Amino acid sequence: MTDATHAPDSRVRARTSGGLGHLTLDRPEAINALDLGMIRDLEATLDAWSTHPDVQLVLLDGSGERGFCAGGDVRGLYEQIVAGEADETGGFFREEYALNARLAEYPKPVVVFADGITMGGGIGLAGHAAIRIVTERSRLAMPETRIGFTPDVGGTWLLAHAPGRLGEYLGLTGASMTASDAIYAGFADHFVPSDRLSSLAEALETRADPSSPTELVLLFDESVEPGRLRADQVWIDDAFSADTVAEIIGRLRASDADAASATADALEQLSPTALSVTLAAVRAARELPDLRAALAQEYALGMWFATTQPDLREGIRAQLVDKDRNPKWNPAAIADVPSERPGEALAHSPRIPLWS
């Protein structure tokens, strides 16, 4: 197996063998959370392999036992916001979103092992690949509202195309999906037990018959019991089809479902602005033509949160910096969010275009 030419301190390992290009996120102490260097290394290698005659398919996975990728460099984002470094923030978003689009449009099949924790920026890598593998250890989520933000990295595009109103539910609550839930919601394609991933990787490398990646994966794919989302969809669809966040909470309070009241309690602890904007963003994404359009919308929203609205900074502070778990949202109540606020956020015009 041949190693690609990366810097010695690179947090992405790249090697090729038998027609397989294998990329491994290598920051296990942070559950492989993405920093700008990792994004650039991934992009550079994918560019090189896109026309390489000896690479027919790409495998992307993560090192360590805890997960594939826990997200982006949120602490770094916080430092940029505090320092007023909007250009740096915008640059990070643009490069990350360009990588998300690159994976979705890659000319060769990309297989991703979303084993363990796969959240936020991890969804941006795994969710747009051609073949998305989950295991019994997988936990997938878009938990951005918990830090006063909104789903990005193409998350609104995936949420918008989930069955029924699961997109609104998963986007607003940040609820975690098991392997079964992720497949049902359209975030994954196949279930493979974690102890068989190494054998699957070897099969992808040796390309024994059947030779196509999908056919090979099907040899390892196993059936999985229906998950919670399918069982809960009736009350989720009823509540999350309401026009506003306040009405969603009202329907949850009136529901007979056991989990509905707890869901309402959870929503009332989150940023009212983030909830209102996320609801609008997921619904707007349903009307967009493609992933790139959704990423452009998310870029405008991300820059609005980073430069205009204080809840993202406060949410990161409370959850990851001071860790007091006591954010002071502004406004603090859902009823106090101006009705025009989601529209203002969606219409935000970034100073630098996302796509050149």
Image: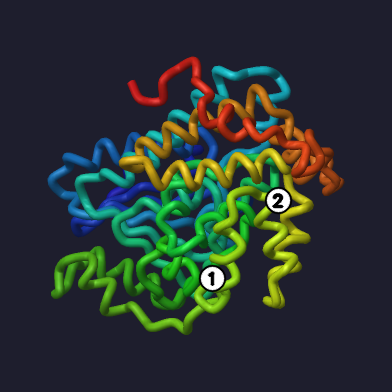
Q: Is residue 131 left or right of residue 8?
A: left
On-image quarter of the C terminus: top left
Q: Is residue 208 left or right of residue 260?
A: left
Circle on res. 25? none
Q: Secondary structure at mark 1?
A: loop
Residue at 69% across / 38% down in the picture? 273
Is residue 118 positioned above or below 234 on the image?
above
How far apart are labels 1 and 2 at the CA level?
A: 28 Å
Is residue 81 positioned above or below 285 on the image?
above
Observer-nearest of 278 and 3: 278
Which amino acid type corresponds to the residue marked 1 in the rendered image? Answer: Thr
Residue at 49% across / 15% down in the picture? 351
Please provide percent x and percent y for residue 120: 55, 49
Residue count near mark 2 (Cα–Cα under 10 Å), binned few <14, some 14–19, many ≥20: some
Which amino acid type corresponds to the residue marked 2 in the rendered image? Answer: Ala
Circle on res. 246? 2
Is residue 162 positioned above or below 49 on the image?
below
Q: Is residue 317 in sight in this rendering?
A: no
Please provide percent x and percent y for residue 18: 20, 59
Q: Is residue 256 left or right of residue 133?
A: right
Residue at 32% across / 59% down in the picture? 111
Q: How is the image coloured?
A: rainbow
Q: Which residue is mark 1?
A: 178
Count of number-bearing discs: 2
Residue at 29% across / 69% down in the picture? 202
Please provide percent x and percent y for residue 256: 70, 77
Please provide percent x and percent y for residue 295: 42, 37
Q: Secondary structure at mark 2?
A: helix
| Residue occupying the far top of the picture | 351
- N-terminal-most mark, 1 or 2: 1
